[in-house]
Image: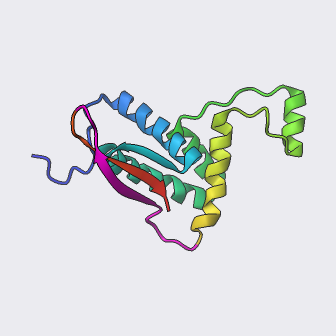
Amino acid sequence: MRHAKRKYKLGRTGSHKRAMIANMLKDLIDHERIETSLIKAKELKRHADKMITLAKKDTLASKRMAISKLRLQYNHLTPKEARKAKDGDTSAYNTDRKVLNKLFALKQRYETREGGYTRIIRKSFQVGDSSPTCILEYI
């Protein structure tokens, strides 16, 4: 029996599921809207709302938790690039650094909101297996 089991298994191993959730979260934060299957969106919604809650705290611990959940990897900056980045030039940053910066910039949008930062809009059915698709987006 699956009473009080709120996670979707998604037919994947645990490590594959964690990697998929991390990649989809990065895309959602970067583009603020993604199209996926309904079950994946329902599972991702839980994690996306928690990421905004972490961003609203804006502490060093919350940044480290976000890095861990998103599985971010930084490229090493040369001393010259580090100096430019300190002055505000972020052209040497990889996409993971930009995603983290964008996540912590999103917190201003949700300062007065207590929860429910994402919405699921049902769309249509996939051609191959008729599974429902939807759009997951930040409000």
- From the viewer's perspective, tell me whether residue 129 is left or right of residue 138: left
Q: Position of residue 48 (x, y in %)?
A: 46, 51
- From the viewer's perspective, tell me whether residue 6 is left or right of residue 102: left
Write the residue at 47% across / 54% down: 137
Q: Residue furthest left?
A: 1
Q: Nearer the viewer, residue 121 or 42?
A: 121
Look at the image and say whether residue 126 sits in the magenta stretch. yes
Write the residue at 47% across / 38% down: 22
Write the residue at 48% across / 71% down: 114
* Residue 54 in the image: above or below residue 79: below
Q: Position of residue 85 (x, y in %)?
A: 84, 39
Q: Which picture quadrant has residue 104? A: bottom right
* Residue 115 in the image: above or below residue 41: below
Q: Which picture quadrant has residue 55? A: bottom right
- From the viewer's perspective, tell me whether residue 105 is left or right of residue 15: right
Q: Position of residue 70 (x, y in %)?
A: 53, 39
Could you tell me how many numbered marks the image carries?
0
Q: Position of residue 50 (x, y in %)?
A: 47, 55
- From the viewer's perspective, tell me whether residue 81 is left or right of residue 97: right
Q: Give the residues drawn in magenta, as a range.
A: 112-128
Q: How is the image coloured?
A: rainbow
Write the residue at 51% across / 46% down: 28
